[in-house]
Amino acid sequence: MLASLTLSQAEWDAILLSLRIGMSAVAWTLPPGIAIAWLLARREFRGKALLDGIVHLPLVLPPVVIGYLLLIALGRQGWLGQWLHEGLGVSLPFTWQGAAVASGVMAFPLLVRAVRLSLEAVDPKLEAAANTLGAGRWRIFCTITLPLAIPGVLTGTLLAFARALSEFGATITFASNIPHETRTLPLALYTLIQMPGKEAAAARLCLLAVIIAMLSLIASETLARRARQRTRQRDG
Amino acid sequence: MNSAASLRLALRKRLGGFQLETDLTLPDRGVSALFGASGSGKTSLLRLIAGLDRPDHGHIRLGERALVDVAQGQWLPPNKRRIGIVFQEPRLFPHYRVRGNLTYGMPAHARPRFNAIVELLGIGSLLDRLPGTLSGGEAQRVSIGRALLSDPQLLLMDEPLSGLDGARKQELLTFILSLVRDIQIPIVYISHDPGEIIAIADHLVVIEAGRVLASDSLETVLQRLDLTPQLGGFDLASVLPARIAGHDATYELTHLALEDGQTLVVPRLAAPPGSELRVRIPARDVGLALAPITATSYRNQLRASVERIAPSPDDDSAMELLLGLGRHRLRSRLTRKSCAELKLAPGMSVTALIRTVSFDIRRH
């Protein structure tokens, strides 16, 4: 089954592409993810329940639906896509950037949930103390709230990264299955399964997917534990 | 150093079961204590001063500055008020070292004071520690230093000793007393502990169910016979300013001069002659005689005049007396029977026999 322990060019392509798309997905979702998590954790406003619902949609909708909605919005004829194409010359469908958008959207709820939980765990009394020491809202966020929420932000980031790596439905719908461009690990695996006689190659990719997912989960746990130890409140 | 500024509070705020309503001005120097039972509205008032809550009506001014004025639509957020707060719990930032906590709110022009404040609070050896490794008393001292280094115009302290046990409490109280002597800004000190208030306050505000019952100098408020139920915990004492006139090495005694020139003799004190201090005389420890008595072990006899006599509100067998002693007043609690037998009446000259005197060494 594992004829060779070295990876073929196609396998390397799929892995590197997956990592690139996963990282890009996390990179673009992190700032809005933290901002929305903060809004949900610390602010009361009209439409909060609606925002919360929208953020969670990718968790409950079939991924294909998300991919289809992205095509409608970001396709060349889509309202946002048209503006992106004509204004900035950017076209997302059928590109690896498009795959990063699709997997980012799918990973977004996991990121927001983890960050929100850790922001809520930050004692508002510390923020009030910083406030009375002359710090405005932005400084409080950067120096108190965010640093104390770092364990959750790290967990959320790696969770979102793992989710983005494993994204399939929305990606294939929105970005298609183009070798070297949008054929990530899950898509490559799917392609192999469709072909007769490729069972061994499929099994190898399957094993690779498990290894990468495990590594990122372990990394997430380790980082979060270290961050927690550093900021332990009492009797550290 | 800051120019001193008095704090004016004229406001109303609806709180759960009652209305907090104040119309008072706190002095621009010294320590003003807010005293009242838990839930009387003390901490709510502090949150309003700090800007952590907004009043429903009225205004708060610090010197010339309006911190909030509901009618004028003025509002300064907490970070613009220049008010330092020491909370009940230290609230140190767990991810900053002690040094980082101290400098968090420190403007550049306060930097030269860093060493002095660190030394005053005895936290020099803690600078590189994380807050999680500090004891309760150490953490609270750092929190006081952090508030002071933010260069406030007013310092608010919300029961800063409440989380500490007896010995630590005494230790921190000593630090706070020396700090009060050194800093020039007014302090508002919240407490429900009469012992702390006697030790630290110059001005006393008594709050009950959101209403201000009294706001005057500590000495004057403690003489209010009508507040006896609220001030029961104060052990009814008089507080008088005094100066060390000299020491008597033979008998290990110290002579204290009161403002009207009379003298108290007490066991020898460590402070040098000339030191100013406050003496505290419990009302139960002040007896009266119609004339000076000679053959007695009472060292301390003061000439005084009876100013007022009233029945004790909480003890049917006792009378509360107010004695004039120069500019100051001395409280005495006698049995009704003694008062009747001595035929005491306002205006009479008497001799006050003083059994115990306790001290509180600090500037007055």
Image: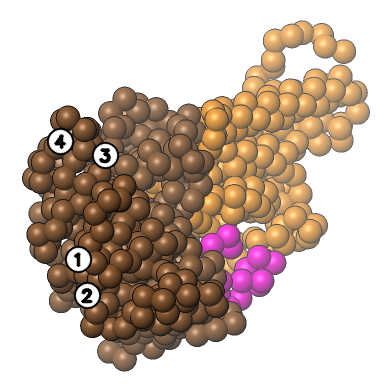
Chain colours: A orange, B brown
Q: Quadrant of the N terminus of chain B?
A: bottom left
Label 1 is found on which chain of the structure? B
Q: Which mark is residue B248?
A: 4
Inter-mark Cα distance, 2 to 3? 28 Å
Under circle 3, the secondary element is strand
2 vs 4, front mark: 2
Which of the numbered marks, if any, corresponds to residue B267? 3
CA neighbours of label 4 inside 10 A, class few (<14), some (14 to 19), many (20+): few
Give the label, 2 or 3, closer to the camera: 2
Quadrant of the rendering where the C terminus of chain B is positioned: bottom left
Residue in the image at 24% along x and 67% along y:
B291
**C-alpha gap between disc 4 and disc 3:** 9 Å
Query: What separation in Å lies between label 2 and label 1 (alpha carbons)?
Result: 7 Å
- Nearer the N terminus, badge 4 or badge 3? 4
The three-letter amino acid code for the residue at tag 1 is Arg
The answer to which of B85 and B320 lies nearer the viewer is: B320
Name the front one of labels 3 and 1: 1
Classed neighbour count for the residue bearing mark 3: other residues with Cα under 10 Å, few (<14), some (14–19), many (≥20)? few
Residue occupied by mark 1: B303
Q: Is residue B233 magenta?
A: no
Residue B227: x, y in percent? 43, 77
CB atoms of marks 3 and 1 within 8 Å: no
Q: Position of residue B241 (x, y in %)?
A: 19, 58
Q: Are marks 1 and 4 on the same chain?
A: yes
Does the magenta stretch mainly form a helix, a strand or a loop? helix
Q: Amino acid at mark 2?
A: Ser
Tell me: residue A22, above or below residue A42.
above
Q: Earlier in the sequence, mark 2 or mark 4?
A: 4
Q: Is residue B335 visible?
A: yes
